[in-house]
């Protein structure tokens, strides 16, 4: 018997594979071992749980802190960075695809409008890199306000010392040409109103978040 947490040798894996040859799986031919009524009740109970804000945050935090999820996000970050550096036209294609979907898919529009509504109230979904950055701010004892509305117009990821803004940018979204232009306009407006802006890419945060926060700490110490 293999104990939890131990790694099987190649010989053991091969032996186990051979032992299962010519055996019929217990679920072969069964589409779903549960009745439709059981599936419906389970789905409804999970939906009710998911409506609970604390439960949802707990599940998201648990997922974001799992080692496998973090490793997957780092790999995705590196892959997406390379993809859009090598193929900038790919971002354009995705942008056009999103615009067409916005025009033709009503449910897609409704979901995004709901997210936008929450964003305007300062309640938008927080990304894994935001959560990671926030944890490091706490570790380095830097006071901040998250999801702060500025100039009654923009919601920034973090605000420090009344005028220092931190934005955590996903590699895919913030490489799109229309988003790049929006970010430029947004940054100019904020800078003209006396704010200092630090932007960090997803791959920078995943590679070395402590170094990102250290740059802010060094600036504050000036």
Image (cartoon, helix red, strand yellow):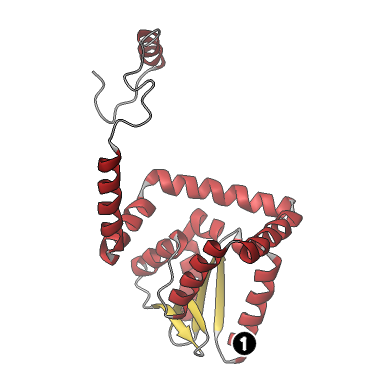
Q: Residue at the location (55% across, 83% down)?
A: 196
Compared with residue 82, is residue 104 higher up or lower down, i.e. above or below?
below
| Residue at which label 1 appears | 189
Residue 172 horizontal/vertical position (percent): 61, 58
Total marks placed: 1
User: Toward the viewer: 133 or 123?
Assistant: 123
Residue 49 horizontal/vertical position (percent): 26, 58
Residue 144: quadrant of the picture: bottom left
Say whether residue 122 is left or right of residue 61: right
Label 1 Cα neighbours within 10 Å, binned few <14 / some 14-19 / many ≥20:
some
Say whether residue 25 is left or right of residue 106: left
Residue 55 horizontal/vertical position (percent): 26, 60
Residue 88: quadrant of the picture: bottom right
Residue 121: quadrant of the picture: bottom left
Residue 1 horizontal/vertical position (percent): 23, 18
Compared with residue 211, is residue 184 higher up or lower down, i.e. above or below?
below
In this orientation, does residue 117 appear? yes
Compared with residue 195, is residue 20 higher up or lower down, i.e. above or below?
above
User: Toward the viewer: 134 or 123?
Assistant: 123
Q: Secondary structure at mark 1?
A: helix
In this orientation, does residue 157 appear? no
Q: Residue at the location (46% across, 45% down)?
A: 71
User: Toward the viewer: 91 or 14?
Assistant: 91
Q: Residue at the location (56% across, 64% down)?
A: 106
User: Toward the viewer: 159 or 207?
Assistant: 159
């Amino acid at each position: 018997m293999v104990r939890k947490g131990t790694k099987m040798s190649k010989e053991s894996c091969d032996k186990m594979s051979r032992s299962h040859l010519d055996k019929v799986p217990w679920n072969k031919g069964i589409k779903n071992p549960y009745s439709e009524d059981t599936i419906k009740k389970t789905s409804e109970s999970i939906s009710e749980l998911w409506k609970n804000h604390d439960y949802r945050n707990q599940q998201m935090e648990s997922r974001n802190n799992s080692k496998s999820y973090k490793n997957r996000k780092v790999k995705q970050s590196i892959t997406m960075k390379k993809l859009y550096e090598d193929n900038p036209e790919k971002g354009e294609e995705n942008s056009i695809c999103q615009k067409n979907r916005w025009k033709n898919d009503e449910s897609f529009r409704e979901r995004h409008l709901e997210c936008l509504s929450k964003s305007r109230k300062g309640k938008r979904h927080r990304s894994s890199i935001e959560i990671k950055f926030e944890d490091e701010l706490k570790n380095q004892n830097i006071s901040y306000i998250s999801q702060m509305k500025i100039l009654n117009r923009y919601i920034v990821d973090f605000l420090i010392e009344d005028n220092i803004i931190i934005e955590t940018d996903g590699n895919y979204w913030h490489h799109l040409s229309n988003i790049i232009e929006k970010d430029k306009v947004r940054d100019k407006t904020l800078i003209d109103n006396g704010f200092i802006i630090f932007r960090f890419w997803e791959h920078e945060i995943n590679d070395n978040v402590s170094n990102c926060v250290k740059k802010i700490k060094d600036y504050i110490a000036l």
